[in-house]
Amino acid sequence: MRDARLPSVFLLSLLLAAAAAGLGAQASPVAPAPPPAGATAAGPAFRAEGGSYVARGSGSGALESEALERARAAALRALFAGLGKDRLFAEVFLRDPPIGLVFITEAAGKEGALFAATVSLRVDDESLRIVARGPFLAAALSLLDEKGRLRANLGIEKEGPSLDLLDTSESPRAQLTVDGKQGPRLDFTDEKGVQASLRP
């Protein structure tokens, strides 16, 4: 057996594999769930062990590396299904895999014309909680319009929170802030860059 961390080269393919798996749309807390379909005689596809979760997957391919990649993707799908996690969680997880994530190659070799591999993964509960909280810990939230232009930005700066509203050329037109003295301020900027401010 050998341990291997998720190489960055696999992230895109794993994200696509997770999306193709049709993960549910509902979010749920981290908790063990009944083993999903795909449990084998070698053991369940997903199980809880103390403060960690273990998932297993198998894959095959023309190359050993392809079989291992598919097995890792299958193990990740088993993890997400076993935890009842939605697509947003899977995307965040794959974009920035937790430090506690470890892959273990249980078997890999040629079977007939193809290579086959079985991989298990282990990740601790606290790492999953950090991933689950990740989307809500961002320092800024940006909103784009249907053409991909930045139209609003909600952020937390050193002095305090701010809300920026931008026009179609992505120029700031209105800004609501709370300054370092905890006082509110509303700034307006016209198309020529002239600014007017309001304070209580």
Image: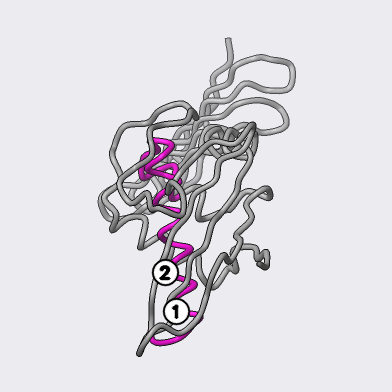
* 121 or 166: nearer the viewer: 121
From the image, tell me which residue sits under label 2.
Answer: 70
Residue 80 location (% of width, % of height)? 42, 44
- Report the side of 40 relative to 195 (left or right): left
- Report the side of 22 relative to 34 (left or right): left
Callouts 2 and 1 close, C-beta under 8 Å:
yes
**Residue 66 marker:** 1
The relative height of residue 111 versus residue 44 in the rendered view (above or below) is below
Estimate how packed mark 1 is, as few (under 14), some (14 to 19) or many (20 or more) residues with alpha carbons within 10 Å: some
The kind of secondary structure element at disc 2 is helix
- Please name the residue shown 28% across and 40% down the image: 24
Q: Is residue 139 visible?
A: no
- Amino acid at circle 1: Glu
Which picture quadrant has residue 35?
top left
Task: Give the extent of the magenta segment.
Answer: 62-91
> Is residue 14 a member of the stretch shown in magenta?
no
The kind of secondary structure element at disc 1 is helix
